[in-house]
Amino acid sequence: MIKSKKIIINILVIFILLLCLFFSFKYLYNNAEPCFNEDNGIKLPVIMYHHISKKQKLLNDFAITPEQFEKDMLYLKEKGYETISVEQLLDYVYNNAPLPEKPVMITFDDGHESFYEYIYPILQKYDLKAILSIVGSFTDTYSENEDHNIDYSYLTWKQINEMADSPYVEIGNHTYDLHSLDKGRKGCSKKSGESVEQYKEFLTKDVLKLQDEILNYTSYNSNIFTYPFGRYSKETKEIIKELGFSVIFTCAEVVNVVDKDNPDFLYNLGRFNRPNGTSSQEFFKKIIEN
């Protein structure tokens, strides 16, 4: 009888210990860092913007209002996200520097003058960071042209230099003159019948022309490259890497996973295009809430 009681007591003790272990693991699981996935990679969403306008007729899949952009930034802040720069990302990958618990990147393509008019003040107001990828030929044209209209004009070198000198904006290379789909070449992709050697020579000449201009006008040596229209060929990435770039932004709508053991992810950074017509909550739901 005594022996039976001891067995029962031992069983109860073991059961209680197992129960404690169960709830301990449950607590640790539920309170784990939300920015890490099962492969211990930090999730990094990148948002892609283009033009900003206050005119309803100009709003479309690539143009939103400044008010909507500000709402987007406030929504991200409310959800605990913090904007980071490419420099911060590289410091994390190569130098083990810390990142925010919930990092997010904000990118703007093409270099519309509306960025300087509407976005730059918002970045300053909320202490936010953004990556601005410019097209060299656009910038040259409007730096020499007195006809400026916020509806269609592009940034000048003077404006770009001012922002590059601030802690809020990093400048990216969006090619010098390959932002086109109707000149026989789609973005910076290889033309039909073009040899690899011809393509490499052509792309290198175009990209380095803008690199030289960015350095000459701003003293900023950009290490950021952004595919025009997200169009490229199988040889493009290696050519861009050989030119000394550290990151490449694509148009693939995926949440990136930051993996120190595989830094090649830096040359395939996906982004979500931000169109007009949806609220911040609706837009970000599929990106940061899943």
Image (spheres, rainbow, N blue to C red):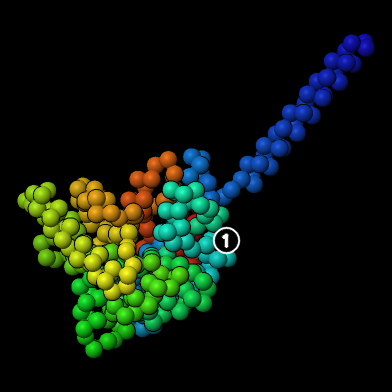
Against 280, residue 20 (above or below) is: above
Residue depicted at x 33% and y 67%: 220
Tell me where residue 94 appears, x and y as whole percent: 43, 48
* 3 to the left or right of 89: right
Quadrant hosting residue 111: bottom left
Give how far across and how far down residue 123 sits, in percent: 47, 73
**In the rendered view, would you say 13 is above or below 221?**
above
Residue 181 pos. (x, y %): 17, 64
Position of residue 146 measured from the top left corner of the image (x, y, whole percent): 23, 89
Residue at the left extreme of this rendering: 193
Residue located 50% across and 57% down the image: 103
Q: Secondary structure at mark 1?
A: loop
Q: Residue at x 53, y 53 (%)?
A: 98
* Left or right of 5, for residue 245: left
Q: Quadrant of residue 117?
A: bottom left
**Between residues 74 and 120, which one lies in front from this camera angle?**
120
Quarter residue 251 falls in: bottom left
Question: Looking at the image, can residue 187 be seen?
Answer: no
Left or right of residue 73: residue 169: left
In the rendered image, which residue does mark 1 sit on?
Answer: 80
Picture residue at 21% right of the left edge, 85% below the top: 145
Residue 139 visible, this orientation: yes
**Exactly how many numbered labels are in the figure?**
1
